[in-house]
Amino acid sequence: MARRDSAAALSPQMAARYGIRPTSRWLILAIAVTGAAFVGVLGWITWRMATPPVQSELLSFRVVNASRVDITFNVRRDTGSETVCVLRARDELHVDVGYATVNISAGRDYVLSTYPLATLARATSAEILGCDKGAAPFVDAPSFAPGTVNPPQLASIDGS
């Protein structure tokens, strides 16, 4: 407001000499519309990231023996969508000892499951790396010790 008053108080020659001119109403409108669009897009992106189509939660894991850990987890998803989850178990050195990509068939929107993850050695931790609709999520690749391979895993869980 002070700038507009000072521009009005100057003579036209002084305003021209120092480059002071009234602010265009169209410029103010364009800035306001651009700002509102930016806030709208930012809000939409935040909402999409906060509410993914598939949500999973690790409830517990139980080390059964040196060759198996039971992972209990739940998945919330769209009813008609097949879901793919990636599970991992690690030993005390943080080396993978079990890794599974599991398909959950289409069906219920809430699936509670206990998955028997086969392991190469005794696990000290287990986790869900992620779940996604229709395809494997983008997660870390397995990091087994050199010369070892992942033991055979169950490929699917019934989601109906």
Image (tube, rainbow, N blue to C red):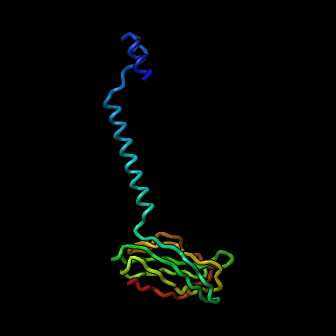
Tally of numbered tags: 0
Q: Position of residue 82 (x, y in %)?
A: 37, 78
What's the residue at 42%, 81% (across, down)? 104
Q: Residue furthest right?
A: 92
Residue 30, image quadrant: top left
Q: Position of residue 124 (x, y in %)?
A: 65, 79
What's the residue at 41%, 56% (across, down)? 45
What's the residue at 61%, 82% (across, down)? 97
In the picture, the quarter occupied by the N terminus is top left
Looking at the image, residue 61 lies above or below residue 48? below
Looking at the image, residue 9 lies above or below residue 160? above
In front here: 120 or 133?
133
Looking at the image, residue 131 lies above or below residue 155? above
In the image, is 68 to the left or to the right of 103? right
In the picture, the quarter occupied by the C terminus is bottom left
What's the residue at 39%, 76% (across, down)? 109
In front here: 94 or 23?
23
In the image, is 36 to the left or to the right of 137? left
Residue 133, image quadrant: bottom left
Q: Position of residue 33 (x, y in %)?
A: 34, 40
Residue 71, image quadrant: bottom right
Q: Position of residue 131 (x, y in %)?
A: 46, 73
